Image (spheres, rainbow, N blue to C red):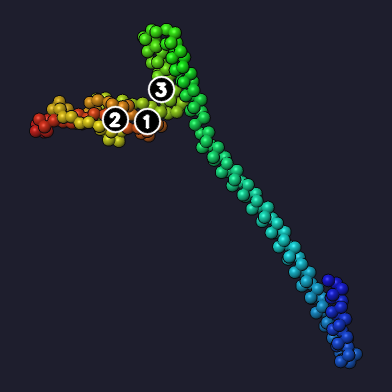
Amino acid sequence: MKKDTEDSRDEIKEQVDSQATPQEAEQNEEAVAAEVDETAVLKEQIKKLEDEKNEMKDQYVRKYADFENFRKRLIRDKEEAVKYANSSLLEDLIEVLDNFERAVSSSGQNRDFDTFLNGVQMIEKQFSGMLEKKWGLKKFSPLNEPFDPEKHEALMMTESPDVKEAIVAQVFQNGYILNDRILRHAKVQVCMPGKAEKETN
């Protein structure tokens, strides 16, 4: 780049010197030198800007690659979290399953039904206790409670003059609450106030 600048300066100087007086030639030479120096400075600035552009492009490529790796890692972690989210619950269920297997094995050797029934009842109690204590799952049976459509699902209805409001007369299937939220409504039969009760009101 320096050689090109000097060549340009010499060419311009020769053209000016051939047409001007010595004083004018000297002035023109100074002007040409200043112009050529300015051109050199501009070329140097352009080169510097190109270098900065290339450096910024490299930084962008690296940052983009880092971001893509981070995004893929998040997706992989999320997939694994969903895939193994129930591992703790399943570990607890395995213990209950072990107890059922022992009960079945014991019943094969000992035909005592009362002993077998007692073992199954103990397993059911252990299972329910574990679900409530560790997982916040609580069973409810609303027999003889006022009917609540937020908690109960009415499968049948009867009428009776002995009740003043809708009452759960029979529970077909217990309901479950998970951490204060209804997980499953209790399936029930509802007893409604009969006609005789309505007439007295």
Q: Earlier in the sequence, mark 3 or mark 2?
A: 3
Task: Report the disc number at residue 187.
Answer: 2
Residue linked to disc 3: 128
Q: Decide which of 37, 185 is in the foreground and name it.
A: 185
Q: Earlier in the sequence, mark 3 or mark 1?
A: 3
* Quadrant (top left, top right, bottom left, bottom right) of the C terminus: top left
Q: Quadrant of residue 135?
A: top left
The answer to whether residue 51 is above or below residue 69 is below
The amino acid on which the numbered mark 3 sits, given as a three-letter code, is Ser
* Quadrant (top left, top right, bottom left, bottom right) of the N terminus: bottom right
Residue at left offset 42%, top offset 25%: 132
Residue at left offset 83%, top offset 82%: 32
The amino acid on which the numbered mark 1 sits, given as a three-letter code, is Ile
- Mark 1, secondary structure of its residue: strand
The percent position of residue 184, horizontal first and vertical second, equals: 35, 32
How many numbered discs sit on the rendered protein? 3
Q: Decide which of 16, 80 is in the foreground and name it.
A: 80
**What's the distance in space between the residues labelled 3 and 2, CA to CA?**
19 Å
Q: Decide which of 70, 99 is in the foreground and name it.
A: 99
Residue 29 visible, this angle: no
Instruction: Give yes or no for contact between labels 1 and 2 (Cβ–Cβ under 8 Å).
Output: no
The percent position of residue 104, horizontal first and vertical second, equals: 43, 14
Q: Is residue 130 left or right of residue 69?
A: left
Residue linked to disc 1: 177
- Mark 3, secondary structure of its residue: helix
**What's the distance in space between the residues labelled 3 and 1, CA to CA?**
12 Å
Of all residues, the one furthest to the right in this rendering is 22
The answer to whether residue 105 is above or below residue 157 is above
Instruction: Give yes or no for contact between labels 3 and 1 (Cβ–Cβ under 8 Å).
Output: no
Q: Earlier in the sequence, mark 1 or mark 2?
A: 1
Residue at left offset 68%, top offset 52%: 62
